[in-house]
Amino acid sequence: MPKRITITLSDALHTASDLLRKRRKYRTLSEYFAALARYDGQSQREHHLTAEWAALSGYERDALDAAILRQVESGQGLRGSWLESRIEEIVKRHLAAGHTPATKEVAAELAEEIAKKP
């Protein structure tokens, strides 16, 4: 029997989720989130960056969510080379300063860059 739960999303993340749900032809947000959970369970990939984003301040998460909504509305997500090159640049910048960055630092800086992206 299905279990009813409640989740909390920013307005921007809710809107982005609903747009993605419709684009992917799920009938409800429940179906969409269940599919995300199934995909995550099936792929078993680490959440190196997105898990760190949960630790950002509410203000930082709101800015990130607003940037994600802009990306969803534009239909242009961050794939492969753009994302990888940003991560690489952040790590290189830290290493050049004599510091090995923690995943949390890279995630926070990447969130800032995504939020600044028009």
Image (cartoon, helix red, strand yellow):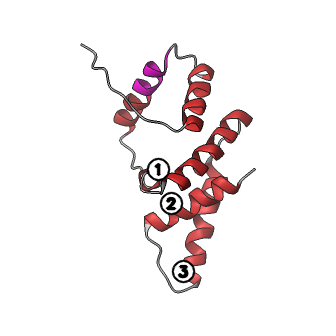
Which mark identifies residue 95? 3
Nearer to us in this view, 42 or 19: 19
User: For the residue labelled by badge 1, is the local secondary structure a helix, a strand or a loop?
Assistant: helix
Q: Is residue 29 magenta?
A: yes
Q: Circle 1 sits on which residue?
A: 50
Rendered residue at 71%/53% (across/down): 117
Q: Is residue 78 visible?
A: no
Magenta stretch mostly in which secondary structure? helix
Specify the segment rendered in magenta: 28-35
Query: Gap in Å between the C-alphas at discs 2 and 1?
Result: 7 Å
The crowding category of the residue bearing disc 3, from other C-alpha atoms within 10 Å (few below 14, some 14 to 19, many at least 20), is few
- Tag 1: residue type? Thr
User: Of all residues shown, which one is farthest toward the left?
Assistant: 1
Mark 2 element type:
helix
Residue at 52% across, 39% down:
10
Q: Earlier in the sequence, mark 2 or mark 1?
A: 1
Alpha-carbon span between mark 3 and mark 1: 22 Å
Where on the picture, by quarter, is residue 15? top right
**Magenta-colored stretch includes residue 110:** no
Sort mark 2 into few (<14), some (14-19) or many (20+) by Cα contacts within 10 Å: many
| 78 w.r.t. 28: above or below | below
Q: Which mark is residue 74?
A: none
Mark 2 or mark 3, whichever is nearer to me? 2
Q: Do the CB atoms of the residues marked 2 and 1 lie less than 8 Å apart?
A: yes
Number of other residues with Cα within 10 Å of mark 1, as a class: few under 14, some 14 to 19, many 20 or more: few
> x, y percentage for residue 85?
64, 61
Location of residue 18 (image quadrant): top right
Task: Name the residue type under label 3.
Answer: Leu
Q: CA distance from mark 2 to mark 3?
A: 16 Å
